Amino acid sequence: MKQRVLMALRENNGYVSGQELCGKLGVSRTAIWKIVNSLKEQGYNIESVRNRGYRLIECPDVILPEAIKEQINTKWFAGKIIYHACVDSTNNEVKRLADSEKEGLLVIADEQTAGKGRRGRVWQSPPNSGIWMSFLLKPDIPPDKASMITIVAAMAARRAVAEATGLSPLIKWPNDLVVNGRKITGILTEMATDIESINYVIVGIGFNVNNKSFPEELAATATSLEMELGHEVNREKLIALFGKHFENIYEQLIADGDLSRLKSEYEQYLVNNNAEVVIDNQGKTINARALGINEKGELLIVDEDGNRQAVRAGEVSVRGVYGYV
Ligand code: BTN
């Protein structure tokens, strides 16, 4: 109910009378008064004027699932949205629900206390700043094709950021988004499989949106959309745009069984394309030049002796010769 009162206040620039809210939401004036008071305690600046009603003057940057649902317009992505002000990790939360929920379940948190990055790293997930979200997929594809989903998620995130902000992020293979050489988005894909089939895939994605700064150890490699643009970005809109693009490209992947329709767009923004890279394969490093990706999303490389090979996401890590990119 709190969410619905907030939505009603947010939709209206001026005053909304208590009576109007009661009629719209089907609750008593006292109930509305109590909800408004509790919103004020949460930091919402709401003016109450006798005979005129309530007016939202300022609200903290919160994510409202109701507002996402209004904007998202997808067939199955985010068919159900669960929002937590704080959770250990949205990937963990989806994992706990995976057996009982349908494909498309989206879990969003304002803060994560145990955000997980790739390769066992910690993902800093402070409140009121980023989008920390994970969604559930149950694809009918062989397990060895699952790494392509990660490429799809990166492409959807790139399109969403470009559409929402006008920025043009690059992609560091396989799935980091980078603006001015610093990371704005990371993706962690986890899956549960039987011998030959996938039970489920969890795609976890973190967007640094309205972070004002980063701790010293991340400052050289991380940035946020706000830091790049100089103004805040609406997180709900970005989530809705991501959903639209993800559903669209994911359906292409399932129909085609590969990334043939995505390859050229992906390569257009691939920061490593034709660049010198260092490939780390479980401690063994190779200096090579990246030549783009193949239809399976593997990175094509040629090493210093001219040997060509395709390396797969999840098996190797890639960095630039002079650092992160
Ligand atoms: C990376 O290391 O680049 C991957 C970072 C993935 C972070 C996201 S935030 C939402 C989801 N929940 C997690 O615990 N991790 C992912």
Image (cartoon, grey):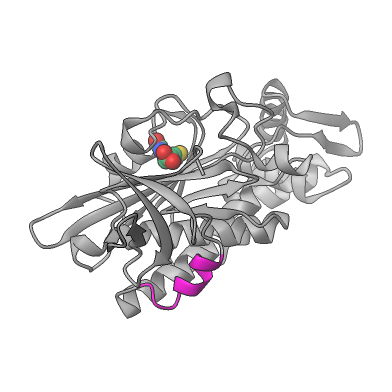
Image position of 200 (left or right of 263):
left
Position of residue 263 measured from the top left corner of the image (x, y, whole percent): 44, 72
Position of residue 271 measured from the top left corner of the image (x, y, whole percent): 53, 55
Q: Is residue 262 magenta?
A: yes
Residue 281 seen in the current view: yes
- Please determine whether, in this image, residue 282 is positioned above or below residue 40: below
Q: What residue do we see at 67% from left, 43% from top?
A: 225
Image position of 154 (left or right of 168):
left
Image position of 240 (left or right of 281):
right
Q: Nearer the viewer, residue 45 or 308?
A: 308
Say how many tags the image has: 0
Farthest front residue in view: 305
Quadrant for ligand 1 reads: top left
> The N terminus lies in which quarter of the figure?
top right
- Please determine whether, in this image, residue 46 is positioned above or below residue 234: above
- Range of the magenta residues? 259-268
Farthest left residue in view: 195
Residue 78 seen in the current view: no
Quadrant of the image occupied by residue 242? bottom right
Dominant secondary structure of the magenta stretch?
helix
Quadrant of the image occupied by residue 103? bottom left
Q: Nearer the viewer, residue 2 or 88?
A: 88
Q: Is residue 238 magenta?
A: no
Q: Nearer the viewer, residue 100 or 314?
A: 314
Position of residue 7 measured from the top left corner of the image (x, y, whole percent): 69, 46
Q: What residue do we see at 86% from left, 47% from top?
A: 13
Q: What residue do we see at 60% from left, 43% from top?
A: 181
Position of residue 254 measured from the top left corner of the image (x, y, whole percent): 33, 73
Q: What residue do we see at 45% from left, 70% from top?
A: 249
- Please determine whether, in this image, residue 210 is positioned above or below residue 100: above
